[in-house]
Image: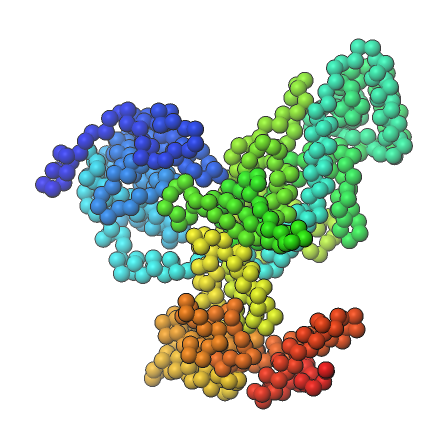
């Protein structure tokens, strides 16, 4: 208690005028003098948040029970100005905001129990709060975050002038051994669910349709709508111009057999008349609505046309629809009240394509700006590679983020091009809410734009709305390519799932392992480099973690497979010996490890350096590896030579893959139109594979020919 009293006596009282963000870098064009001070009841934190898609955040201290308000202010101030006790690291402003909410939940709970002082709380009170948190049935990680935030009231006691917790709650709330082990386990495992393959395939198909096929129709409709809304003529005093223009327009409707537009909720139809959208007709004719809506003679002309062509079910633009599905226009026409929704769908489709095919995080996508795409062209001027530039934040040492680059595909480049057409100049950020022309009284079009990108939760809602539209569209047209449910429910997409799923896909596809060296030898490496982004983006490590997880699963299958002669080939016997050693290590009299996760952990600890793949299984020995490079401590995928390396072993699955490949080569070589040079190269490769199987006493069966069948 003496040391605590001494620390408090040395504590400098915070001046009421102290700026709370004085130690934080501020956004551009924001002066410190305009930011919040300690005495304010609301602290605006947004000036120190540099991720532009984050929402406006502020701390409302009037929500804190009054007896604890000063304590919380001092604690949050210490976190913001980075006045920390020994052993504490600086935390981000966004995290401080979350800590404030979690601490306040605890203080409100104390207040509701009649608590007036923190230093009067007992061990039982703290245990009761832990039970209260567990009773909310949130995730274990969420519970840990709340309890850790409350513990700050003890850890920062030397920074608080008045009320503090009387004891450290950590021994009450956490078992140090179990807690530490659980944290290490969580750190190794990516718990973000990946999108199931049966869901991802149709989602990407429809997103690509919007980006590559439908985008032009939608953007032309937006432009037509904007042009139509910009036309607001003066009231015609002479009536002659109005009569001529309206008569000409109605003649077009009759000639095209086009129904007149139906009015929606706005503007309201005139009582006693059919709900014709007079406002739309007036804009098409270039006259003022008030002129035709209050003159009986004009309504008489409209009624005659209405009797002849009828009334439509909505108001549609005249924009022609060029894109098609199954040789039919994908849409009859674009309704005026659907413009905003269709622009959001198009933007969502672009997000899906970029997120899955680039590996970028949500924050990195939201910082894409006009001009972010660069094209690398060959000597003929044809693009061969595309590079995206944005800001990366996670894992960086600055809240400002750093510039990062991603090599992407032509499909991603197309999505960026669409976004640049979607977002009007001079708006920079490509994922702001797309502006929709709005009517203003007598002033045509309001092209005001939203300066900040959508928040993450808004993007999540838009993606799920896009998925719902796909299923509604398919159901209405009896199509079978909708997005299926999972366990009877629509899949709930989040922004993190795309990066997680891409890492899984790269790790599990043939080109992502040694197996791909046969037919994806260079493609897989280029894909990996393109998707990995900068080294600081962390995506390369995520892919490598997925590859390690995949290998552990495959090794588990081999270890648990008791069939004799599981592997053949040059290194087949050695592979059998290594797997037998692993199997022996996990057994002892009376017990065998049957749980796959436990077995996987054991294999990770006692790595046999066996790398299963689609075509070959590598039994890695560095002294005889043809792929060996000084900078690697394992097989190098891009330098694998599976037909010549003595580290190669073959499972029955590998042999079947070779046979399927040989069958495909036979079919391709049967094409009489193939160029002689290509035929010779393919035949040579086919013969090499056939000879490899023959040298290892592997019958080719009916799937492949022998080395001498073709010249």
Classify residue 74 as left or right of residue 202: left
Q: Give the quarter of the figure containing the C terminus.
A: bottom right
Which residue is painted at 21% across and 36% down in the image?
A: 160
Classify residue 251 as left or right of residue 579: right
* x and y percentages locating residue 437 in the rendered image: 65, 29
Hey, which quadrant is residue 69 in on the image? top left
Name the outermost residue toward the left: 2
Camera-nearest residue between 461 and 549:
549
Q: Give the quarter of the figure containing the N terminus.
A: top left
Which residue is painted at 13% across and 34% down in the image?
A: 9
Classify residue 298 as left or right of residue 117: right
* x and y percentages locating residue 471 in the rendered image: 66, 50
- Residue 305 at least partly seen: no
431 up-or-down from 409: above or below:
above
Which residue is painted at 50% across and 53% down in the image?
A: 533
Camera-nearest residue between 624 and 596:
624
Classify residue 103 as left or right of residue 643: left
Which residue is painted at 53% across and 56% down in the image?
A: 531
179 up-or-down from 674: above or below:
above
Name the outermost residue toward the bottom: 697
- Residue 174 at least partly seen: yes
526 up-or-down from 43: above or below:
below
* x and y percentages locating residue 641 in the rendered image: 54, 75
213 up-or-down from 242: above or below:
below
Name the outermost residue toward the front: 379
* x and y percentages locating residue 56 in the rendered image: 44, 33
């Amino acid at each position: 208690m003496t040391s605590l009293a001494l620390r408090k006596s040395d504590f400098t009282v915070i001046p009421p005028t102290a700026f709370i963000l004085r130690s934080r870098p501020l956004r551009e064009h924001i002066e410190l003098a305009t930011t919040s001070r300690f005495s304010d009841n609301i602290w605006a934190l947004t000036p120190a948040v540099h991720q532009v898609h984050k929402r406006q955040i502020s701390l409302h201290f009037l929500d804190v029970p009054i007896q604890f308000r000063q304590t919380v202010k001092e604690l949050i101030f210490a976190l913001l100005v980075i006045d920390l006790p020994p052993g504490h690291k600086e935390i981000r402003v966004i995290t401080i905001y979350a800590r404030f909410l979690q601490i306040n939940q605890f203080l409100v709970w104390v207040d509701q129990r009649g608590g007036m002082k923190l230093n009067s709380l007992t061990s039982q009170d703290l245990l009761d709060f832990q039970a209260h948190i567990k009773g909310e049935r949130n995730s274990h990680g969420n519970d840990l975050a709340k309890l850790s935030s409350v513990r700050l009231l003890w850890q920062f006691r030397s920074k608080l002038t008045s009320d503090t917790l009387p004891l450290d709650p950590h021994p009450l709330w956490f078992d140090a051994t179990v807690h530490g082990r659980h944290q290490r386990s969580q750190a190794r495992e990516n718990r973000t669910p990946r999108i199931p393959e049966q869901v991802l395939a149709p989602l990407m198909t429809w997103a690509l349709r919007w980006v590559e096929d439908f985008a032009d129709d939608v953007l032309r409709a937006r432009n037509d709508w904007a042009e139509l809304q910009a036309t607001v003529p003066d009231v015609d005093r002479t009536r002659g111009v109005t009569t001529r223009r309206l008569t000409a327009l109605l003649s077009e409707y009759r000639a095209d057999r086009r129904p007149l537009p139906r009015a929606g909720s706005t503007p309201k139809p005139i009582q006693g008349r059919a709900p014709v959208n007079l406002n739309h007709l007036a804009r098409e004719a270039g006259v003022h609505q008030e002129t035709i809506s209050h003159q009986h003679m004009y309504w008489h002309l409209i009624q005659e046309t209405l009797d002849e062509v009828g009334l439509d079910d909505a108001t549609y633009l005249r924009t022609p629809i060029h894109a098609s599905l199954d040789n039919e226009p994908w849409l009859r026409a674009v309704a005026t009240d659907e413009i905003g929704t269709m622009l959001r769908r198009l933007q969502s489709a672009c997000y899906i394509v970029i997120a899955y095919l680039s590996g970028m995080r949500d924050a990195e996508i939201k910082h894409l700006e006009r001009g972010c795409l660069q094209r690398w062209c060959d000597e003929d001027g044809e693009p061969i590679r595309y590079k995206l530039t944005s800001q990366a934040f996670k894992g960086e040492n600055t809240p400002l983020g750093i510039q990062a680059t991603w090599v992407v595909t032509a499909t991603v480049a197309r999505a960026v091009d669409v976004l640049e057409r979607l977002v009007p100049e001079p708006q920079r950020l490509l994922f702001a809410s797309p502006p929709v022309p709005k009517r203003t009284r007598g002033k045509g079009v309001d092209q005001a734009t939203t300066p900040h990108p959508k928040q993450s939760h808004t993007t999540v809602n838009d993606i799920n709305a896009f998925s719902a539209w796909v299923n509604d569209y398919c159901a209405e047209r009896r199509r079978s390519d909708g997005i299926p449910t999972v366990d009877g429910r629509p899949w709930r997409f989040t922004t993190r799932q795309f990066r997680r799923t891409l890492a899984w896909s790269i790790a599990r596809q043939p080109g992502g392992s040694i197996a791909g060296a046969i037919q994806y030898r260079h493609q897989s490496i280029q894909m990996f480099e393109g998707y990995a982004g900068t080294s600081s983006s962390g995506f390369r490590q995520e892919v490598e973690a997925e590859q390690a997880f995949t290998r552990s699963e495959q090794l588990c299958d081999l270890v648990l497979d008791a069939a004799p002669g599981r592997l053949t080939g040059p290194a087949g016997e050695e592979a059998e010996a290594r797997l037998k050693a692993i199997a022996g290590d996990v057994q002892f009299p009376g017990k065998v490890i049957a749980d796959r996760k436990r077995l996987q952990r054991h294999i990770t600890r006692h790595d046999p350096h066996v790398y299963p793949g689609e075509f070959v299984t590598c039994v890695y020995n560095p002294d005889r590896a043809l792929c060996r490079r000084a900078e690697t401590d394992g097989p190098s995928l891009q330098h694998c030579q599976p037909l010549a390396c003595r580290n190669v072993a073959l499972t029955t699955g590998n042999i079947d893959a070779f046979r399927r490949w040989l069958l495909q080569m036979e079919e391709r070589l049967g094409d009489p139109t193939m160029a002689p040079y290509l035929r010779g190269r393919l035949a040579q490769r086919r013969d090499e594979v056939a000879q490899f199987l023959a040298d290892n006493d592997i019958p080719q069966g009916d799937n492949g020919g022998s080395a001498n069948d073709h010249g």
